[in-house]
Image: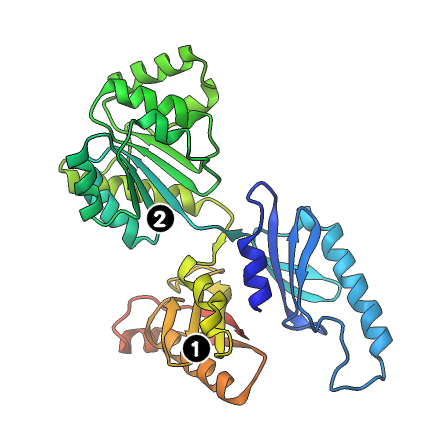
Amino acid sequence: MQGFFQAVRELSPDCRNIAAVVIEGEFFACRLLLSDGRIVWESSDSGQKENGEKAGYEDRQTRYGLFREELAAQWEKLPGCGIYESGFGKIFCETPGREKKMVVCGGGHVSIPLIQIGRMMGYRVTVLEDRPKFADNARKAGASEVFCEPFAERLAKIQGDADTYFVIVTRGHRYDQECLFHIAGKQHAYIGMIGSRKRAAAVKAAVIEQGADPAVIESVYTPIGLAIGAQTPEEIAVAIAAQIIQVKSKKESSSFPPEMMDAVLDEKNAGQPKVLATIIRRRGSAPREAGAKMLVLKDGTCLGTIGGGCAEAEIQNKARLMMREGTKAELCRADLSADAAQEEGMICGGVIDVLLERV
C-alpha cells in the first residue's frame, strides 16, 4: 500500500478524489484511487490469479474490468465518506483530505493560545507578523513556521487550498483590511476575522470597494469564533478553534494525517510490517466517525486513534496478530455494549466496523 499513500500525497486538490476499498465481495480488500473519474492507482493484485491457479483467471479478470469500469463511470455518485453498493459487492469510499493548514495573520495575545491549540489539533500553523518581538513569541508558542515581514508580501507567496484556514487577528483596522483583501482571492476552507461588528463591516466594505468578490467577503466569519461568551485571549482562541472544527466537520473528507503518511513512506520503515485500521461503519454513540484511522506499527506504537478504550485495544491486538500471521486484510467489529462501556468508565457505547489492512 505504499504506492497508494504516495498517490494520495500527489492528488490534485482541484479534483474530486475518491479512495475506494472493497469491503465485501469477490475483490475484498482491493483498493482504487480515483481522481475526477480517472483511476490513478489500484491494488497490484486486483483481478490477479488466486493461489497461483489458472482456472477462472480470465473470468476474474473480465469481472474485475467491469467492476473498475463501473466505479469510473459512477465516480460523481460515489459518497464522499460512506458505503457504495456495487454489483460486485460493497465498497467503502472516502475523500482523502490533505494536511490541514492554519494561517494566522498577527502574533498578538489571541494568536499565542490559538497557535498552541492549532498544533494540538494537528494543523500546520503558519504565522505572519511584521514585528520581530511578536514573531519571536509565535515561534516560542510552537508555530510550524513564522514569517516576519509585511503581511501583503508574505500573503502573495501563500497559495491557499481547500484545506487552508485563514485567521485574521492583527493589531488594527488597516492590517485587517490588507490581509482580507489578499486572502479573498485565494482558495480557502475558512476565513475568520476578529473585531466588532461595526469594525468588521467597515473593513469588509472597504475590501469590496477595492475589488474583492462580495460573495467571498460576505462569507467571512466575523466576529470570529463561536458565540460562547469568550472574553480572555485563551477563551477567544478556543472559540475560534471550535468554529474551525465546526466548518471542517461539514466537509466530506477523511484524513490521512501527515505523521501517518510519513511513517508509511519513510524508506527506513519500508520493510517493517504495519496495519492500517479504518472505521468503515459506525452505529450508536461510538466516539469516532467513519473514515477515522489508526496505523499500528510492529513495535506496538500507534499513530492516530479510532476512539480509544477497550474497542481500540481490541483492534490493536488483532492488528499485531495480522502482522505475525501475515494476513493481508480483515474486516472486524468492535462492540462496546452498555455494560462494557460502564465497566470501562465510559458513557458511550456503540458498534464500529473496522477494516484492517496490512501495509
Indicate the amino acid at tag 1.
Ile
* Residue at 33% across, 32% down: 192
Q: Quadrant of residue 1?
A: bottom right
Residue under pointer 2: 124
Q: Is residue 105 visible?
A: yes
Q: Is residue 173 above or below residue 253?
A: above
Q: Is residue 39 above or below residue 171?
A: below
User: For this rendering, which residue is in front, 99 or 68?
Assistant: 99
Residue 230 in picture, x, y percent from top left: 18, 37
Q: Nearer the viewer, mark 2 or mark 1?
A: 2
Picture coordinates of residue 187, whole percent (x, y): 48, 33
- Residue labelled with disc 1: 315
Q: Which residue is at the front of the view, 284 or 25?
A: 25
Task: Point out residue 354 in the picture as x, y percentages from the top left corner.
Answer: 50, 71
Whether residue 230 is visible, yes or no, is no
State the residue lying farthest toward the bottom.
325
Q: Position of residue 244 (x, y in %)?
A: 35, 42
